[in-house]
Image: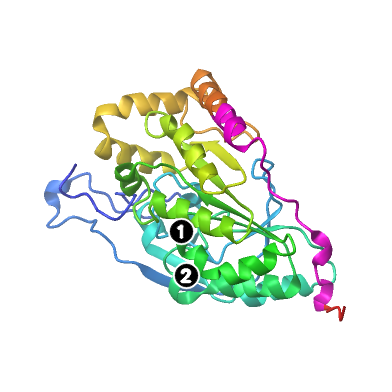
Amino acid sequence: MDEGYFKGRGAQIKSFNKFLKAHYVEEHIEGLDESLLESPSTQIFYENPKKIVNKVDSPDLGFGYSMNPYQGCEHGCIYCYARNTHEYYGFSAGLDFESKIIVKQNAPQLLEQQLLNKNWNAVPIMLSGNTDCYQPLERKLQITRRLLKILVQYRHPVSIISKNNLITRDLDLLKDLAADNLVHVMISITTLDEDLRRKLEPRTTTSIKRLKTVEALAKENIPVGIMNAPIIPGLNHHEIHAILKAAADHGALTAGMTIVRLNGSIATIFEDWLRKNFPDRFDKVWNQICSMHGGSVNDSEFGRRMKGEGNVAEAIHQLFRSCKKKYFSDRKMPPFDLTKFRKGGSYSLF
């Protein structure tokens, strides 16, 4: 590995931002007194958006609304599709995404305004969906916990996806919601190989802690499943069976998956990362990703982009289906109860 490798960070470059007019380059490195890049410390930026609940139009994602209290994510997952959204803020999808974190400090107030709107009807909202709502800053800022308190107050349904065991801090609120079938939780488990996890998702909770998180939620009767995503041929595809079995053994009710796709700037960021971490298998991994997306590392067509196509993708899907049938055929997430919503903030005395 390169001596200049930034340990604890996923991306190793500041990728090109098409929205900026000027860019730093190192094409003539002999003329530089020092490198333009160094391992960044985390910076916090505060934003006061006008809304926090956003309508999701993508038919691939399976939910209609989402809210994200943080933009950018310290977890640093190299494959994260949300990296591209950081460019709208004038930052790079690379190192900036995981070191310049934008905090939506008025998110709880905006959520309450949304739920009090007379035209709003109870529809499950995905908490996260873009960046992890339980990333490291949440431990101190507790914006996600404040959002959950409002959802508890109004008895509103919510789905959560995270890869951080910090979610167990909020067991009291999740248990309250689960009592009325108002919450689903999905824990993301990409690999059980800790060496791979440290490179792929450098600032995330270990896979063992994630499985323990699944177990802790299940013991409290909080509906929980896992997302084995993204599956990357040549890196983690062979772990499908072990991950699904471990998840089932720890109490998960369901499992989902997606195939890796490298959209926008993520292609450049991932390629650089793959060359530096796995030079011996770069060609194999890169070519297999291309084979799943019609010769490219990305596919933008709804219904196909997250599933892939071709022999490699089909082999992965067949393995996943057989493992899911083996370990989850007698399990399922309970349906949400949308009748519990206190529309307009009204409270029943009975």
Disc 1 on helix, strand or loop?
Answer: loop
Residue that badge 1 annotates: 164
Q: Residue at x 67, y 69 (%)?
A: 176
Circle 2/circle 1 CB separation < 8 Å: yes
Q: Counting residues from the N terminus, which is met first, the one under dot 2 or under dot 1?
A: 2
Disc 2 on helix, strand or loop?
Answer: helix
Task: Check residue 97 for magenta coloring.
Answer: no
Residue 336 in the image: state x and y as whole percent.
75, 55
Which quarter of the rendering shows the C terminus? Answer: bottom right
Task: Check residue 329 for magenta coloring.
Answer: yes
Residue 107 in the image: state x and y as whole percent.
60, 72
Q: Which mark is residue 138?
A: 2
249 or 302: nearer the viewer: 249
Q: Based on the displayed image, in which of its 4 quarters is residue 299 positioned? A: top right
Residue 90 in the image: state x and y as whole percent.
44, 60
224 or 118: nearer the viewer: 224
Question: Is residue 131 something one can see in this rendering?
Answer: no
Please say if 211 is above or below 44: above
Question: Is residue 180 something one can see in this rendering?
Answer: yes
Q: Which mark is residue 175?
A: none
Identity, as a three-letter code, of the amino acid under mark 2: Glu
Instruction: Give the magenta part as a residue range.
Output: 320-345
Q: Mark 1: few, some, or many residues within 10 Å (few <14, many ≥20)?
A: many
Which quarter of the rendering shows the N terminus? Answer: top left
2 left or right, relative to 98: left
Please say if 194 is above or below 343: above
Question: How many callouts does the rendering have?
Answer: 2
